[in-house]
Image: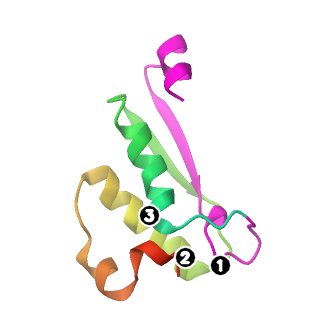
Amino acid sequence: MTEVVSKYRPGKIVMQCGADSLAWDRLGPLNLTLRGHGECVRFMKHFGIPMLVLGGGGYTMRNVARCWAYETGVLLEKVLFILVRMYRIGDGR
């Protein structure tokens, strides 16, 4: 993505964060952890380009809600302590 951003110099980024790529999703086979999914968002944010971040996908509702809440925290640069208490961020469950 670094090369793409460097070459095309976008004025805005639209990022769709499908939670079906998380581990334990009923339909998705990719097995990303919540933290790994959030790191993708953090990486794109580091370019400093205005972003529109969309949810999508995800067929295990507790994963979807936690994923989007966690990524909202990543975008706001805030730790959402409710997630830390109810969910072990590193293990994806």
Q: Earlier in the sequence, mark 3 or mark 1?
A: 1
Q: Quadrant of residue 90?
A: bottom left
The amino acid on which the numbered mark 3 sits, given as a three-letter code, is Arg
Secondary element at tag 2: helix
Q: Mark 2 and 1 residues: CB-CB less than 8 Å, in contact? A: yes
Q: Earlier in the sequence, mark 2 or mark 1?
A: 1
In the picture as drawn, the residue positioned furthest to the front comes out as 91
Tell me, for residue 63, which label it has, or none: 2
In front: mark 2 or mark 1?
Answer: 1
**Count of numbered tags:** 3
Residue 31 covered by magenta stretch = no
Depth check, front residue: 47 or 90: 90
Is 15 above or below relative to 61?
above
Q: CA distance from mark 3 to mark 2?
A: 12 Å
Q: Position of residue 91 (x, y in %)?
A: 49, 77
- On residue 35, which mark appears? 3
Residue at 45% from the left image edge and 41% from the top image edge: 52
Q: Image quadrant of residue 69?
A: bottom left
Identity, as a three-letter code, of the amino acid under mark 2: Asn
Q: Nearer the viewer, residue 86 or 52?
A: 86
Q: Can you tell which mark lies on residue 24?
A: 1
Q: Is 13 inside the magenta-drawn segment?
A: yes
Vertically, is 37 above or below 22?
above
Badge nearest the viewer, 3 or 2: 3
The x and y percentages for residue 39 are 43, 52
Q: Give the distance between the C-alpha atoms of the residues marked 2 and 1, in whole angstroms.
A: 8 Å
For label 1, count other residues whose C-alpha is less than 10 Å away and answer few (under 14), some (14-19) or many (20+).
Answer: some
User: In the rendered structure, which amino acid carries the disc numbered 1?
Assistant: Trp
